[in-house]
Amino acid sequence: MPGIRSNVFAGQLRSATTELQHATSDLHINPSNSKGLLASGPQKQIWTLLEYTLSKMSTTTATSMQSSHPPIIPKDFSAQQPKTIRLYPLSNYTFGTKETQPEEDPSVLARLKRLEEHYEKHGMRRTCEGVLVCHEHNHPHVLMLQIANAFFKLPGDYLHFDDDEVEGFKKRLNERLAPVGSQFSGEGVNEDWEIGDTLAQWWRPNFETFMYPFLPGHVTRPKECKKLYFIQLPKKKVLSVPKNMKLLAVPLFELYDNTARYGPQLSAIPHLLSRYNFEFVDENDNVVAATPGAPLPEHQIPRTKVLAGETNDGQDAGMTDYTEGGENGGENAQ
């Protein structure tokens, strides 16, 4: 049966390829002329059909493989959208390791005790964490740290009481992810952090592990506020991770509604990012996919392009290492 199916598929592929060659040969498109040389009548109808492949309501862009069954174009659906975010492939970034950074607190109770001491001296603690996004196979992936093979967290930390919010946050990101000394050289080594929109605020009403995306009405003196920021990654960047941690690229589909593994804060990230339109580029800066809704340049001419992807030994672990009862004794529930 597998052999029969393969032969049938091969025959269908040859037939589709022949039809595509006949259709494109009738168009008389001059490769050196982006507008092409088009006639009227049936050729004009074929051109109209091909124009549909540039529909702004499709994820496929003009640099990617085009379908012979184009989508129907509805009215524009991009009003009141924030700016489109460009995501670069994971392969653009260089990763290394640096000296171990032990956790400040040996236990959850010790961490809450230190929070109480901070509050008594400096008031509410300010914490900043970054949502760093790249893409793999044209799907957004969030970079996050894993500690002790169990506890997941975003890059960032609490700010010192006298630090400016943005500059203090950049300093914390450098402490966690910046390469040390002359460990690396080239593009992306000294690239500054681009702090984007505030995606969420989480509040800690009491000296407890629970945090909420709202401040209860009866709470007038919250103990901590944690902000999540969108971090626009540049085209290339070098990131170094402490040896006692792992840097993971987690796809949005794994985070979504997965509070048992990642906790309520991290599993809410797909909701927070849903307000953005993304365009996905390859290593050569070609836009290979885009969120439907954003208009494409009118001068782009549809053409077929065969994309080849490298095999990657580092696969997402997904739920394969998940154990019953959650991660790290419920640590991610904070």
Image (cartoon, grey):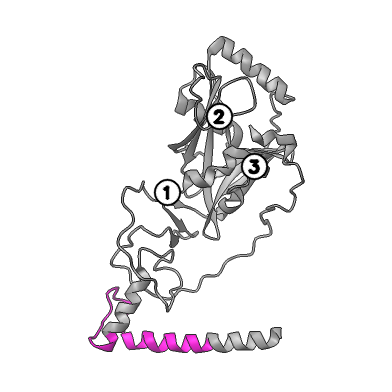
| Residue occupying image coordinates x 35% and y 63% | 56
Q: Is residue 234 visible?
A: no
**Label 2 is placed on what type of residue?**
Arg
Which residue is denoted by mark 3 in the rendering?
262
Q: Secondary structure at mark 1?
A: loop
Which residue is denoted by mark 2 in the rendering?
172
For the residue pair 215 and 100, the one nearer the viewer reads as 215
Upstream in sequence: badge 1 or badge 3:
3
Q: Quadrant of the C terminus?
A: top right
For the residue pair 172 and 9, the one nearer the viewer reads as 9
**Label 3 is placed on what type of residue?**
Tyr
Residue 312: x and y in percent read 65, 60
Query: Residue placed farthest to the top in the image?
Result: 121
| Residue occupying image coordinates x 42% and y 77% | 69
Query: Residue placed farthest to the front in the image?
Result: 218
Magenta residue span:
14-43
